[in-house]
Image (cartoon, grey):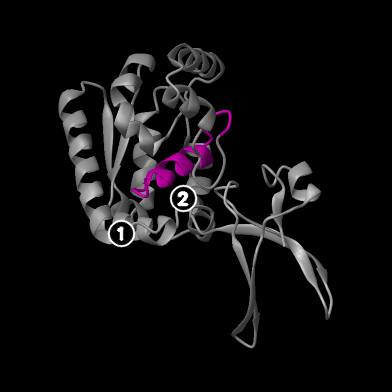
C-alpha cells in the first residue's frame, strides 16, 4: 500500500486495458475479484478470472494486499505476467503517516518487511515479470509506457492510447491524495441561518464512526458537535450506511 501500484494500474487503464468489473479511479483496484480472494472464495475467484479471460484478450488486476496471499494468486491465475513496482521506503512510510496516521518508524519497518516478501517471491517464481522504480517511472514515464506496450505487443497493440497514459502519470496526483486519506470527510450543509446550522457529515472510509463537526468564526473555534443524528437523505442516497450522521 502507498508503494506506487496505482501508477501502474492507472497507466494500464488509460492504455485501454480492462482492470476489473469494479475498478475505478483513483486506484483502479477491482474489489469484485479482490473480495473473492480475500474472503477465500477461491471457486468464485476462478470463475471471475474465467469470465474476464473470455471477454478480454488482455486484462489486469491490482491489489497491494495480494502480497500476503501471492501463493493463492499463483494457483488461481492463468498465465500471469507480474509488474512489480518499487518505491523509496520513507516515501511509503510518510504517505501512510499522512493518509492513514501511521507512525513513521513503524511504517519504515513495515515497508522493509513487505519488500523482503517481494524479493522472496521474485526469487522463487518462474513467471515473467517487469520490475519498475516508482521514482524513475515518474521522471521517465515514456520509458515505462513504452516498456508496457512492448511487453504486450504480441497480444494487443496498446500504442493508440499512449498519450492518455502519459498524461495520467503525474507526481502527487491531487485526486489520489484526497481519496486515499483516512481523514477524508463527506457531508453537506442543508440549513444555514443566524440561529441554526443543520446538515450531515461522515468519515468517507468508515461509516460506522461518528465524527465531530467544528464551527469556526475568524479562525476561532466557536462550537463542536457530534454528527450522529438520523438523516434520511444520505441513507437513501447511499452516502451513509445507517443515516446516523446528522448535526
Residue 232 in sight in this render? yes
Give how far across and how far down residue 24 sits, in percent.
Answer: 57, 40
Instruction: Inspect the magenta stretch and tell me whether residue 214 lies in it.
Output: no
Left or right for 143, reference 207: left
Instruction: Say which of 159 and 42 sits in front.
Output: 42
Crowding at mark 1 (Cα within 10 Å: few <14, some 14-19, many 20+):
few
Q: Marks 2 and 1: which is nearer the front? A: 1
As drawn, 122 above or below 234: above
Q: Which residues are magenta?
A: 1-22
The residue labelled by disc 2 is: 166
Q: Give the SS element for disc 2.
A: helix
The picture quadrant where one finds residue 5 is top left
Crowding at mark 2 (Cα within 10 Å: few <14, some 14-19, many 20+):
some
Q: Looking at the rendering, in which quadrant would you find the C terminus? A: bottom right
Q: CA distance from mark 2 to mark 1?
A: 33 Å
Q: Residue furthest bottom?
A: 218
As drawn, 29 above or below 94: above
Q: Residue at x 26, y 25 (%)?
A: 128
The residue labelled by disc 1 is: 103
Instruction: Say which of 26 and 14 sits in front.
Output: 26
Q: Give the SS element for disc 1.
A: loop
Left or right for 214, reference 183: right
2 and 1 marks in contact (CB < 8 Å): no
Q: Residue at x 36, y 31 (%)?
A: 66
Amino acid at each position: 500500500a502507498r508503494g506506487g501500484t496505482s501508477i501502474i494500474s492507472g497507466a494500464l487503464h488509460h492504455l485501454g486495458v480492462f482492470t476489473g468489473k469494479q475498478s475505478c479511479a483513483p486506484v483502479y483496484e477491482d474489489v469484485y475479484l479482490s473480495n473473492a480472494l480475500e474472503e477465500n472464495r477461491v471457486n468464485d475467484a476462478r470463475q471471475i478470472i474465467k469470465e474476464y479471460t473470455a471477454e478480454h484478450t488482455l486484462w489486469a488486476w491490482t491489489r497491494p494486499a495480494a502480497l500476503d496471499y501471492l501463493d493463492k494468486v499463483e494457483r488461481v491465475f492463468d498465465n500471469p505476467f507480474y509488474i512489480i513496482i518499487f518505491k523509496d521506503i520513507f516515501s511509503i512510510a510518510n504517505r501512510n503517516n499522512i493518509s492513514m496516521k501511521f507512525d513513521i518508524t513503524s511504517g519504515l519497518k513495515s515497508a522493509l518487511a513487505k519488500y523482503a516478501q517481494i524479493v522472496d517471491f521474485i526469487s522463487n517464481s518462474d513467471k515473467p515479470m517487469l520490475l519498475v522504480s516508482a521514482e524513475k517511472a515518474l521522471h521517465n514515464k515514456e520509458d515505462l509506457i513504452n516498456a508496457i506496450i512492448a511487453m504486450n505487443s504480441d497480444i494487443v497493440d496498446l500504442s493508440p492510447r499512449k498519450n492518455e497514459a502519459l498524461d495520467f502519470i503525474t507526481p502527487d496526483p491531487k485526486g489520489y491524495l484526497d481519496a486515499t486519506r483516512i481523514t477524508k470527510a463527506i457531508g453537506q450543509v442543508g440549513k444555514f441561518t443566524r440561529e441554526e446550522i443543520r446538515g450531515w457529515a461522515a468519515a468517507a472510509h468508515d461509516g460506522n464512526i461518528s465524527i465531530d463537526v467544528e464551527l469556526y468564526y475568524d479562525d476561532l473555534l466557536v462550537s463542536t458537535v457530534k454528527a450522529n443524528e438520523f438523516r434520511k437523505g444520505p441513507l437513501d442516497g447511499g452516502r451513509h450506511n445507517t443515516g446516523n450522521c446528522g448535526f
